[in-house]
Image (tube, rainbow, N blue to C red):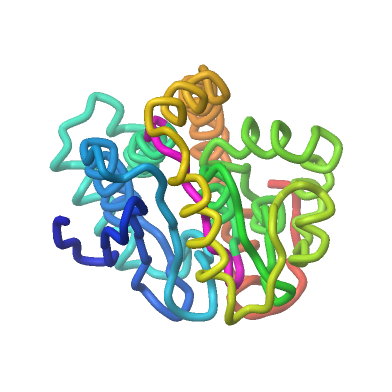
Amino acid sequence: MSTYKDIGVEKVGHVGTIEIRRPPLNFFDISLINQIADALEEFDRDIEIRASVLSAQGKAFCAGANFQDPARQAQEAREADKKGDPADSLGAINHLYIQAVRIFRAKKPIVAAVQGAAIGGGLGLAVSADFRVTCPEARFSANFTKLGFHPGFGLTTTLPELIGKNNAELMFYTSRRVTGEEAVKWGLANVLVPQDQVKAEAMKLANEIAECSPLGLLSTRATMRNGLADRVMAATNHELAEQTRLRATEDFKEGVKATEERRAANFKGR
């Protein structure tokens, strides 16, 4: 297995494991999503690996993007410049979504071990997996509208397909935090266990999957997820356009500031 900066990657029998190592909140950026995509592609090339587990250190699974961190924005801009992509003018987030689509193109089943908060793009990352094992302490939130923003990471496609259009609308329009118990009831998560058992239970499920024929798994998953990555790519193109527009508004600045200060936002609609 290759060595990565922000994730730990191992092979345990027929299961590949990826552990996000940016505790406590595991904020993501282009680099992290790129590393996860690289690891999944490495798993796809390894004939012995039949399923994978995506987990995280710390109290959150992934708290999304750290909008309060100026260094993050500067780094993303630098990485975008290095890419030389013709869409650079749309902003560095475009490159993040290119990497995100790579995750959806992974060929083998993924089990996410969601032991804590999966917020914003972190929810998008959790939903990119085939299955989610979680606990009562976990929180799932598409908190974009509370930031004065638009959903991203393909969630406008993946979330309705997973939990139904109206439940997705409820999560989008309220930005509410859904508990682990609620997530299982809605089909947003598959298994609920005590917090200290989440990763072990995710490994158990991945091993159950890995007992099946590798050729049968690849074939069946390709059928079940047929066109998903392309739908996500189309969704992120639209999401990016809306996010780029809203990023320049006063409401977005107020939403980020209010979140940082832990208070209700005073939106003006401009």
Q: Which residues are magenta?
A: 105-117
Across and down, in percent, residue 19 comes to 37, 66
Q: Quadrant of residue 224?
A: top right
Q: Which image quadrant: the N terminus?
A: bottom left
Q: Is residue 234 above or below residue 57?
A: above
Across and down, in percent, residue 153 comes to 51, 41
Is residue 109 in the magenta section? yes
Q: Nearer the viewer, residue 109 or 248?
A: 109
Q: Quadrant of residue 115?
A: bottom right
Q: Is residue 6 left or right of residue 232?
A: left
Tell me what residue is drawn at x 24 percent, y 24 percent. 86
Across and down, in percent, residue 168 comes to 77, 41
Q: Is residue 154 left or right of residue 6?
A: right
Tell me what residue is drawn at x 46 percent, y 31 percent. 217
Is residue 152 in the magenta section? no
Q: Is residue 244 left or right of residue 32?
A: right
Tell me what residue is drawn at x 69 percent, y 59 percent. 191
Q: Nearer the viewer, residue 91 or 3?
A: 3
Tell me what residue is drawn at x 15 percent, y 62 percent. 3
Q: Quadrant of residue 157?
A: top right
Across and down, in percent, residue 72 comes to 33, 63
Q: Is residue 91 left or right of residue 155?
A: left
